[in-house]
Image (spheres, rainbow, N blue to C red):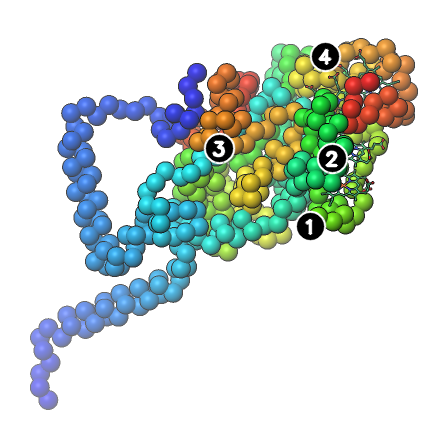
Amino acid sequence: MAAPSPRSHLYRLLLILVVFGAGFLAVKQWATPDSWNYEHWYRGDAVVEAAAQPLVYGGNDSCKTCHKDVAKLWRKKPHRKVACETCHGPIVDHAKAGKKTAVAFIDKTRAQCLNCHLEGINRPRAFPQFSKQGEIGKLVPKHKELDAVTPCAKCHEAHDPRP
Amino acid sequence: MNKPLENRPQSSRPVIDAGGDDARREFLRNFLAGTATATVLMVFGPGVAALAQGGSDSAPAGASGKAAPKHQFAYVINVNNCIGCGNCVRACKRENQVPSAVFRTWVERYVVTGEGMYVESPNGALEGFSQVNAGIREKATKSFTVPKMCNHCENPPCVQVCPVGATFKTKEGFVLVDPEHCLGCAYCVQACPYGARFINPVTHKSDKCTWCYHRVKNGKLPACVTVCPNKARLFGDLNDPESEVTQIFKDEAWMVLKPGMHTDPTCFYVGMPREVV
């Protein structure tokens, strides 16, 4: 038997390195998603998937198509800053693909108005606040006489709140 | 007041004037870049270099080359206008199916008294706030509510620490999480100086505000901006001179949270009292 080459240990080492290197590249190729973005280092399809999340809120324009008259009134009044869906809940609960699917949420209780309008020291001074003593909000005589159950709707209309 | 538009590309760190060193530095930089590119090309083939050019958010290969992104989104919170109603928190939960007890956005109420400060966010202000305790109210010198959320930093620490590249910043400014790659190790939760991240108790993946990426891509505003009744939350494109966010910087001074962290948030606060942390 011929004596082994004096450099066989080096060849063996080289072979191992090549096998490992090839193995590494193969695994890397397999594990890296096709859409990998090397500039920002992420899977490109992740943003496609994120963009595919279904919408829940439709925005004001989504109501206008079917509720022109309410939208028209609302647009000229102080509550134009308040989106329809803030008071009525998201459109998916009410209409889909141009058809009404369920009764829209309507809250006629005082709680909804007071959630925004009850006076509080944390609210901006300029914001109209409901007050019974005029501590922070404007002292409205009609409010002073108010009991704890009369709905605000007795004097205020939700879409046209100024009495 | 400086405009974020002009400020954005730079960080808030002082810029050191390199003076005459510029040419040499540029030479070294180009030399190193050339060496690196050549190495990469030899090892991986020319495909990778093309990928590195970038394109739209999702396209891996750069059709548009290194062109500036079409949109540069920014979020503005006007603390002067926040009434603390909690509609944003509710809408966010609903839009993104955020489980209870965790929040992508929340509202904090600050009550400043001569003896110190009370900060609270009962259940993230999901139900708004109840009246301030009468004893504290008497001593209060001022009080305000501050919405908080992911700041979509220019320089996001959460992205730096992610061991698997599952969180990233897109060209248009969104910092997002890839739930498929996320391990739920929570490094990013710890790295965020704003406490904006959490591990979703249902999916066990890292979760946070996405600026409603799916809504913005469909031409809508984020859910919280949609329902905010008093224009305390604004969202828009800084590349559009007519957008609300661009307009507000014309006459309002802005701040960011924790500027000392050098994260360069793209969520700007207008009218923020100095007590806010």
Task: Answer with the quarter of the image where residue B113 lies.
Answer: top right
Secondary element type, mark 1: loop
Cα separation, mark 2 vs mark 1, equals 18 Å
Between disc 4 and disc 3, whose residue precedes?
A: 4
Secondary element type, mark 2: helix
| Comparing labels 4 and 1, the label whose residue is closer to the camera | 1
The label number, if any, that marks residue B237 in the structure image: 3
Residue A139 at x, y = what percent? 80, 10
Cα separation, mark 4 vs mark 1, equals 53 Å
Residue B235 at x, y = what percent? 54, 32
Residue A144 vertical placement versus B39 (above, below): above
Three-letter amino acid code of the residue under disc 1: Ala
Q: Is residue B131 left or right of residue B185?
A: right
Secondary element type, mark 4: helix
According to the picture, the residue beneath numbered tag 2 turns out to be A68
At 84% from the left and 31% from the top, the residue drawn is A109
Count up the numbered dots: 4
Three-letter amino acid code of the residue under disc 3: Asp
Say which chain tag 3 marks: B
Question: Mark 4–mark 2 contact, CB under 8 Å?
Answer: no
Say which chain tag 2 marks: A
Residue B206 at x, y = what percent? 53, 47
According to the picture, the residue beneath numbered tag 1 turns out to be A97
Residue B243 at x, y = what percent? 51, 28
Foreground residue among B81 and A93? A93
According to the picture, the residue beneath numbered tag 4 turns out to be B138
